[in-house]
Amino acid sequence: MTGKAKPKKHTAKELAAKIDAATTNRGGGKAGLADRSGIEKGGHAKLECPLCKVTAPDVKSMKIHHDAKHPKVAFDETKLNNLHATVVAESSNKPKPGIRGSLKK
C-alpha cells in the first residue's frame, strides 16, 4: 500500500495506450468531418440503393439491406450507385471556388 505523498508510477502499457490515442487518426476534427459528410468521396458509404437511396459501405452490407427491405425485387449489383466514383468524377471537372465563390488564380 502506497502512502499519500508517494506518487504512483504509470505502466508501459498505459503510456503506450496514451501515445497511441494521441497520435492515431480516429476520424474526428475537420478532416473527419469532410469524410463523414460525404463531400469529397461520398463519406464512409460507397454504394447507394437505387430503390430507396440508402447507403452502405460494401456489397455484402447492401445485399443484407436489399434482402431485408426489398424482398420482392431481385438483387442486381450492376444497378447499385457507386458514390465514390460519381463524386470524384464530378468534382474533377469543375474548378473549386475559394472564399465566397471567388476563383483562386
Image (cartoon, rainbow, N blue to C red):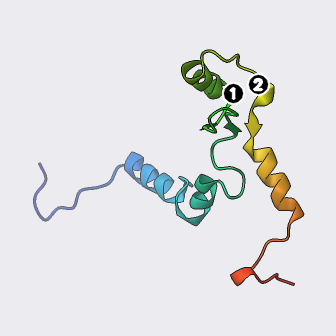
**Front-most of residues 82 and 21:** 82
State yes or no: discs 2 and 1 in contact (Cβ < 8 Å).
yes
> Where residue 37 sits: x, y (%)?
60, 56
Question: Is 5 rendered above or below residue 90?
Answer: below
> Where residue 65 sits: x, y (%)?
58, 26
Q: Which residue is mark 2?
A: 77
Residue at 73% across, 44% down: 83
The quadrant where residue 102 appears? bottom right
> Where residue 30 sits: x, y (%)?
58, 66
User: Could you tell me which secondary element the residue under label 2 belongs to?
Assistant: helix
**Front-most of residues 84 and 29:** 84
37 horizontally vs 10: left or right: right
* Badge 1 density bin: few <14, some 14–19, many ≥20, Cα 10 Å: some
Residue at 41% across, 49% down: 12
Amino acid found under the numbered disc labelled 1 = Val
87 horizontally vs 1: left or right: right
Residue at 61% across, 62% down: 31
Circle nearer the N terminus (2, 1): 1
